Each structure stands twice: as C-alpha cells, then as structure tokens.
C-alpha cells in the first residue's frame, strides 16, 4: 500500500492542485502558505468520518482524491488524530489525560477485565503492605471519636431546645396584639378613605374649574390660531418679504433720484464756474486780439508812410527826368507835387503808425513787444481752447447725469406704482398701515407661542394630536366631572377643617404604624428564635442520622478488615506481572528517544502502578519526571512515544508530522529526521509539514528520493 499523489478540489487557494507523494514528502513554507490546508486534505482522505470537514469541524464544499498503489489505507478519525497525526507538542505532556499512550497501556496491559484505577484507589485507601493494619485502626479510632463527638452535640442541642415553649407563648401574645392593631388600623384607614373621598370630591370641583378655564383657554387659542391664519396670508414671511423688497426697491429708487439730482446740481455749478472762467479767458483773448490789431495797424501805417516817402523820391526823380520833355516849368511843378505829396503823405502815415505803436508798447520796444504779445496771445488762445473743451465736457456730463436722473425718476415712479398695487392687494393704503398689521401679527404670534407650551403639555397628557380633539376632550372631561359630582362644593373654611381632620387621622395612623412595626419586629425576633429552634431540631435530626451512619461505617470497617489483606496480596501479584509487560513498551520508546536527543543511551522508566509515574533521563544522565524536564527534552520524549505508538500498528500506513519539530532545537530536529528511517524501512509513508528550512535540508540529505513541495513559492 502506498499513496502516490493527492488532488485537492475546492480547498481555498488549492482549488485544483495535485501533489505527488513519495516515501517521505515535505511540505514547507511560512505560516500562511497553506500547510494546514494540505494537512486537512490528508485528514479527509485517510480518516473515515471526516469528509468535508476541516480541522475545526467546519463543513465546506471541498473534495480530495487519492492515487493509491495497492489497497487503500483508512483508519477511524479518532485513531488517526491520536496516533498517526502527530502535531506540535506545545503543551505539557500528561499521559493521564492524553488518549493514545495512556489508552494503549490500559488496552494492552489490562485487557483481562481488571479495573486498575479502582484497584489502585482501594489499595491506597487501605495503605501499603507494611502499614495496612495501622491505617484500619486509625480509621476505626477516628470513627469512634466522631461518634462520641456527635453524642455530645446531640446532648447540647437537647439542652438548647428546653426554652422553646416560653418563646412560643410570648410569640402568641405578640401575634394577638398584632391582630388588634390590624383591626384598629383598618378602622382608621376606612375613615381616611372616607375623608379622601370627600377631599377627592373637592379636588373634582377644583378640576372642574380648571377644565372650564382650560376649555376657555383652548377656545381662545383656537381663535388666536384663526387670527394668525388670517394675518399670515397678509403678513406671512413670503408676503412680508415681498412687500419689504418692494419698499426697499422704492426707497432705493428715491435715494437714487435724490443722489442724481444732487449730482446734477453739482455738475451745473461746475459748468457755471467753467463758463465764467471761459468768459474771462475770452475777454482776455479779445483784449490780446485788440492789442495785436493795434500793433498790426500801426505797423501798417508806418510801412505805408515809408512807401509813400519812397514814392515821393521816385516822383522827384521822374520830375527831373521829365524836365527835358516838359520843360523846367512842368518838371519843377511835377517834382514839387509828386515829391512833396508823397513825402507828406508818407510822413503822415509813418507818424500815425508810430504813434499807435507807441501808445501800445512804448517807444523803442516795437519788435520785442510784437513777439511777446504774439506769444501771450497764443497762450491765452490755447487756454481758451482748453476751457472751451472743459465746458463742452461738463455740458455732456450734465446731460448724461440729467438723463440718468430722468431714468431714475421713471424707475421710482414704477416702483411706487408696484408698491401701491401690492398694498392694494394686501388690503391697506399706506406702508404705515401695513407696519401696524405686521406688528399686530407678531403680537398675536407671541400670544400663540406663549400658549403653545401649555397646549402641547395638555395634548401630551390627553394623548390628542389636534387642537379640535383637545377641545372636545376637555369638554367631555368637564361634562364627566359635572356628572360625577354629587355633593356640594365646600367653602374654603370647610375645606380647611376637612384637611385638618385628615391630617389628625394621618398622625393617628402613623402612631399605629409605628407600634405595629415595633410589635412586628418583636414577632420577627421571636420567630427568629423559633427558627433557631427549628434549625436546632434539624441539626439534632441530622446529628442523629450521622450517628447512625457512623455506626454503620464502623461496622463496615470491621467487616472489611479481613478483605484488605486479600486485596493487597492480589495487587502485589498483579504489580509483578505488569512490570514485566511494561518492559516491552519501554524497549519501543527508548530507541526513538535516544535517536532524537542524540545523547547516547537514554533510559526511560514507566511505573507499573500509576500512569503518572513516567520518568526519562535528561542530558546530565539524571532520571526526572516529565514536568521536571526541559521543554526540548519533553518534546523529544513526547515525539518518541508517538512514533513508537504509531509503529505498533499491524499495517503500515501514512504518518503525518504537522510541525512536530517545533519545540526541538536544530540538532534534535536532525535526530528526529534520522529516526524516521525506522518507520520508512518498515513500509511507512511520511508526510512532513514544517516551516524550518534546516529540516528541509536534513530531509534532502537523509532521503535523497524525498518529494519537496514549497507551498510559499510554487503555489503562492
């Protein structure tokens, strides 16, 4: 029989994976690589009754297929888990609680029907061979001493029960007084109930008055709500905001008209000032032009005089020339007339021009004055041009502002018209009347808010959800109060007398209650004493029963005295036979223990009487019990026992080592791998799961044909 390979279907990350197996197969990788998943698959394949269950007993949609060479090998799930699946020994080994080795010892050595645990307990109770008589004598002596002690306690309890009748009589008298107080209390309570009824009736009268006031209040609240509903149409948030928006728009338009009017006035003032400045500049320009004109005219007259003088000279020359033609008389006359006439006229014109120039600029400054006045005239003319442009610009600005003022005036009239239309729709004539309506609306809303708290509390108390239902409910309650009232309403003085009488009865009842409580405490104390007597009676009965039991125990000890000798003899013979049988188990465990520890010969001892008496030799050669061994030595011993137990199977199969080397150091892990040769040589197939790389290296060295699967690399 050999398992050649396995195929995992639906196992988490290994949904469709095949692993080839050899005599020794190693699955290695980190903790999250999936070693536990492959181990669960082997568990499902080999262990019957574990199909579709993981190691935690959870069901799942998964399946594993095995490729067997020869006959398939299956074992029960419990046997596979306890013998053939060797996991990490992270807890202390206790063979008394571990099924497996302990069960093997019991089944192999005590299969004849002898109850070892019962036998050991009985022998330990009787004592060892050398002291069994002493133990029996001590037990009989203890039973007799306990019997004498019980007799003394019985006598003491009988003495304590002697005063029971006196306490019982006192208890009856106190209970009779309790009955009398109870009757008196009932009479007072009846009178109190009568007074309470009358007081309640007066409370009903008061409640009737409150209900009438509440009804009036609810009716007034309903009227206020109706008024609020009517005013909300006119003064609601949306309507009020619309009116305020129209009023703000109208005010803004009026403010814009006022601002533009002021700006027009300011612009007109600036325009008038600019026109005045322009008029002054024009006056200066006209003065300069007049002066320039005078200068030009005077200069013209001077030039004209010069030319006339020149013409006179020419005339004289012509006259001289004409002398030969006209004669000396005619020449003289012509020269005289032409020369004198031209010179006189030229001189007159020159004198006039010079006079005009002198009047303007003075004598000797004609050319300088002419140039200076021409420059001043140009400057004044340019200034006049600038102010004329400024006047034109201001005129345009005044025109634009006036047009804006006209447009703002139109918008103001439009906003005023819309505001008047809106006031007409809400039913008022002026904005002041609407403000009065809004103030009234707010006052009514405040009145309603002041009443809403009382209305809400009244609705919560009555369980109603509307004001109409509350008004109907209050009306029904008021009518009910009127029907329930049979007596007359008392005056305030009569109510005071009624309350005083009720207070006096309350004080009387409190006095009766205090006396009743005092008597009740006395009764409780006496009953406690009677309870103590009852406990004493119970204790007396218990002691008498224990006395009878001790007598029977003493008789049993006397009867079993002879049986212990026979039992001890049988146990000694059985112990000798078991010591021989344990030698076979030691011979199987010891080789594995020695190979794993690698320390030469290591003795292993098993006590034939108790399964807890297991000892093993440590590294110093000292036999120690398991709790006294180190963690690594204890793990080596535990692994050796599990391998020896698996070797006892009649048919070689598959052994799963799931992190079984975790508690071992590297040298002991190497020894544990070498110890697997004993099982492989006998036909066993090993599946090793580990996260230690050195274990993989040792397996490669010891088993060259081993199959190595890196779950962290090949199947990541």
Image (cartoon, rainbow, N blue to C red):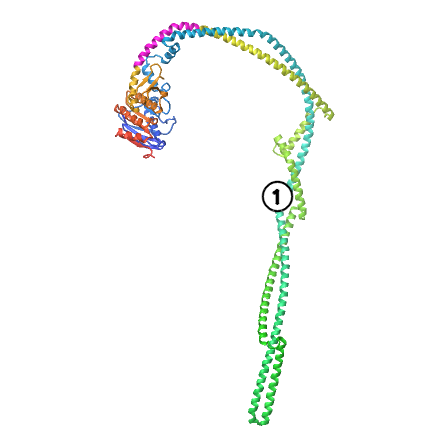
Q: Residue at x 52, y 9 (%)?
A: 539
In the figure, is residue 605 to the left or right of 167? left
Q: Quadrant of the N terminus?
A: top left
Q: Residue 280, can we see it? A: yes
Locate residue 279, reporting x and y percent.
63, 67
| Residue receiving disc 1 | 237
Q: Residue at x 55, y 11 (%)?
A: 532
**Nearer to me, 688 or 255:** 688
**Nearer to me, 367 or 508:** 367
Q: Quadrant of residue 277?
A: bottom right
Q: Residue at x 64, y 12 (%)?
A: 177
Dot 1 lies on which element?
A: helix
Q: Is residue 264 magenta?
A: no
**Nearer to me, 429 or 199:** 199
Locate residue 176, reporting x and y percent.
63, 11
In the figure, is residue 23 to the left or right of 456? left
Locate residue 703, reporting x and y percent.
26, 29
State the count of labels.
1
What stretch of residues is rendered in magenta? 553-580
Q: Main secondary structure of the magenta part?
A: helix
Mark 1, residues whose alpha carbon is within 10 Å: few (<14), some, or many (≥20)? few
Q: Residue 5, can we see it? A: no
548 up-or-down from 681: above or below: above
284 up-or-down from 602: above or below: below
Q: Quadrant of the C terminus?
A: top left
**Nearer to me, 459 or 548:** 548
Q: Quadrant of residue 54?
A: top left
Q: Quadrant of residue 392?
A: bottom right
In the figure, is residue 352 to the left or right of 79? right
Locate residue 295, reporting x and y percent.
60, 76
366 up-or-down from 492: above or below: below
């Amino acid at each position: 029989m050999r398992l050649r390979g396995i195929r995992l279907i639906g196992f988490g990350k290994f949904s469709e994976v095949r692993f080839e197996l050899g005599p020794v197969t190693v699955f290695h990788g980190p903790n999250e690589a999936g070693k536990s998943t492959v181990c669960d698959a082997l568990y499902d394949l080999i262990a019957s009754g574990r199909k579709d269950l993981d190691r935690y007993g959870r069901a799942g949609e998964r399946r594993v297929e095995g490729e067997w060479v020869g006959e398939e090998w299956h074992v029960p799930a419990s046997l596979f888990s306890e013998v053939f699946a060797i996991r990490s020994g992270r807890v202390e080994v206790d063979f008394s609680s571990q099924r497996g080795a302990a069960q093997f010892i019991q089944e192999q050595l005590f299969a004849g029907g002898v109850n070892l645990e019962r036998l050991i307990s009985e022998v330990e109770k009787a004592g060892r061979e050398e002291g069994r008589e002493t133990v029996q004598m001590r037990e009989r002596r203890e039973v007799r001493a306990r019997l004498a002690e019980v007799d003394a306690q019985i006598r003491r309890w009988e003495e304590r029960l002697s005063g029971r009748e006196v306490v019982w009589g006192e208890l009856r008298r106190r209970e009779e007084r309790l009955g009398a107080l109870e009757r008196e209390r009932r009479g007072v309570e009846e009178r109190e109930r009568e007074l309470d009824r009358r007081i309640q009736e007066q409370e009903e009268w008061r409640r009737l008055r409150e209900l009438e006031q509440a009804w009036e209040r609810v009716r007034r609240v309903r009227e206020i709500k109706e008024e609020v509903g009517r005013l909300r149409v006119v003064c609601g948030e949306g309507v009020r905001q619309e009116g305020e928006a129209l009023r703000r728009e109208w005010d803004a338009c009026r403010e814009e008209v006022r601002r533009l009017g002021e700006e027009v006035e300011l612009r007109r003032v600036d325009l008038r000032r600019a026109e005045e400045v322009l008029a002054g500049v024009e006056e200066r320009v006209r003065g300069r032009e007049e002066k320039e004109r005078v200068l030009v005219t005077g200069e013209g007259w001077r030039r004209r005089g010069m030319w006339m003088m020149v013409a006179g000279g020419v005339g004289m020359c012509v006259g001289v020339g004409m002398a030969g033609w006209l004669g000396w008389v005619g020449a003289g006359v012509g020269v005289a007339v032409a020369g004198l006439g031209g010179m006189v006229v030229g001189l007159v014109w020159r004198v006039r021009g010079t006079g005009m120039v002198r009047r303007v600029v003075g004598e000797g400054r004609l050319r300088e004055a002419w140039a200076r006045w021409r420059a001043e005239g140009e400057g004044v003319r340019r200034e006049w041009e600038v102010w004329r442009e400024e006047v034109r610009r201001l005129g345009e600005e005044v025109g634009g502002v006036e047009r804006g003022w006209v447009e703002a005036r139109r918008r103001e009239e439009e906003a005023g018209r819309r505001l008047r239309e809106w006031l007409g729709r809400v039913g008022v004539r002026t904005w002041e009347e609407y403000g009065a309506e809004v103030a009234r609306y707010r006052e009514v809303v405040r009145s309603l808010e002041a009443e809403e708290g009382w209305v809400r509390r009244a609705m919560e108390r009555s369980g109603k959800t509307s004001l109409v239902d509350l008004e109907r409910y209050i009306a029904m309650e008021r009518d009910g109060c009127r029907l329930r009232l049979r007596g007359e309403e008392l005056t305030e003085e009569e109510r005071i007398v009624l309350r005083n009488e009720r207070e006096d009865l309350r004080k009387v009842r409190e006095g009766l209650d205090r006396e009743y409580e005092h008597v009740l405490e006395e009764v409780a104390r006496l009953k406690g004493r009677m309870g103590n007597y009852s406990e004493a009676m119970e204790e007396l009965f218990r002691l008498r029963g224990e006395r009878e039991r001790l007598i029977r125990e003493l008789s049993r000890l006397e009867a079993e005295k002879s049986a212990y000798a026979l039992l001890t003899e049988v146990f000694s013979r059985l112990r000798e036979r078991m010591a021989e049988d344990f030698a076979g188990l030691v011979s199987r465990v010891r080789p594995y223990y020695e190979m794993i520890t690698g320390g030469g010969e290591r003795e292993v001892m098993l006590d034939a009487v108790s399964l807890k008496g297991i000892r093993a030799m440590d590294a110093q050669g000292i036999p120690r019990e398991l709790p006294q061994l180190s963690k690594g030595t204890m793990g080596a011993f535990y692994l050796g026992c599990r391998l020896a137990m698996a070797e006892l199977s009649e048919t070689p199969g598959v052994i799963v080592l799931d992190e079984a080397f975790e508690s071992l150091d590297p040298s002991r892990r190497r020894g544990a791998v070498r110890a697997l040769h004993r099982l492989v040589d006998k036909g066993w197939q090993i599946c090793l799961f580990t996260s230690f790389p050195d274990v993989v290296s040792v397996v490669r060295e010891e088993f060259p044909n081993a199959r190595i699967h890196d779950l962290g690399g090949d199947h990541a």
